[in-house]
Image: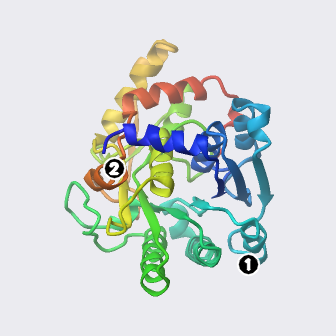
Amino acid sequence: MNNENFSSVCKNLEDSPRLWLVTGVAGFIGSHLLEELLKLNQKVIGLDNFITGFESNLDEVKSLVSAKQWKNFSFFKGDITSIEDCKKVFALRPEFVLHQAALGSVPRSIENPIATNHHNVTGFLNVIEFAKNVRVKGFVYASSSAVYGDHPELPKVEERIGNCLSPYAVSKKIDEQYADVFNLNYGFRAIGLRYFNVFGARQSPNGPYAAVIPKWIDALAGEQTVLINGDGETSRDFCYVKNVVQANILAAAGQTKTNAPKIFNIACGDRTTLNELYRILKDLLVSINPNVKNAKATYQDFRAGDVKHSLADISNAKQFLGYEPKVKIGEGLKECFAWYLSTPKAQKSS
């Protein structure tokens, strides 16, 4: 299969709209899923507790779709850890579930492992149990490349993982194990997507748990010092959010064989070091602010719980989902700049 498969799936959805549930809908990835689904004229139920999501993300989506499309969206302020909140949204009997709600960040999980477990494990179990009970047609959930832990092999292949290095990684690994058990005991198929360093508009540069790309863009634009953990040779497989949206829709509504894997790496299959990323961001900003040319980063200790290198083997996602990452890091960063440099800091949310 190739990328024509995604166009075909989207065409089928437009011709025959479905009812979707997106958990964490006001978050970074969740709001992008909402935007794409509404543009495909789908009906969407959204659930969010605004711990890491923001109303401004929903407001932005509203400004990007038609009034008619926005009417297809029903929002519920609620929490996946609440049985009653889950009962309310699943009473509407969604056909597809894109489960994005979670308490992210490796450092946050090390600081508060109990909260991470509560939201990422208990919350996940609530959602998958209700999804099973109403017999949804497609259930897709966000996992993470963090589950590879200390396994040294590059690129990362789905069936080979190491020891977890953080409570966040443990929580995502447990989600995958629960998904396997639900398939074994109930015949309920759930597809996990292991995200690799997703970036894009609506990703917050604020707070101690901010992702590296929006945080560095914000620092450079404000002529502040960029802090790099370690020697800068740590590498990541950065994946633009539009690629993640494609993967979710394909995994939920595409034609996937029953014997296909149930876990997929979602990335670009490229590796960029933090030093290379810093140079790319400086080059992009220098035309706007020449002072950036002389900016010097400050190196600090390697961050606890992080892996040194990350690179995904995406051959399974290509073969079984028809996934093709259309936007590489350079193009994606250019789109990020357009958003970050035109959006007031107060509105840059999850």
| Quadrant of residue 283 within the rendered picture | top left
Is residue 344 rendered to the left or right of residue 262? right
Is residue 173 shown to the viewer in this render? yes
Residue 186 in the image, given as x and y percentages of width and height: 50, 84
Q: Position of residue 82 (x, y in %)?
A: 74, 75
Residue at 50%, 57% in the rendered image: 252
Could you tell me if the residues under marks 1 and 2 are in contact, i.e. CB atoms within 8 Å? no
User: Can you name the residue that lies furthest to the left here?
Assistant: 153
State the CA–CA distance, disc 1 to disc 2. 42 Å
Which residue is depicted at the point 43% across and 59% down?
A: 193
Other-residue count near label 2 (Cα within 10 Å), few / some / many at <14 / 14–19 / ≥20: some
Of pointers 1 and 2, the one earlier in the residue sequence: 1
Q: Secondary structure at mark 1?
A: helix
The residue tagged 2 is 230
Question: Residue 170's spot in the image, x, y percent?
Answer: 44, 74
- The amino acid type, in three-letter code, at marker 1 is Ile
* Residue 117 horizontal/vertical position (percent): 56, 76
Image position of 241 with respect to 150: above or below: above
Mark 2 is on which residue type?
Gly
Residue 83: numbered disc: 1
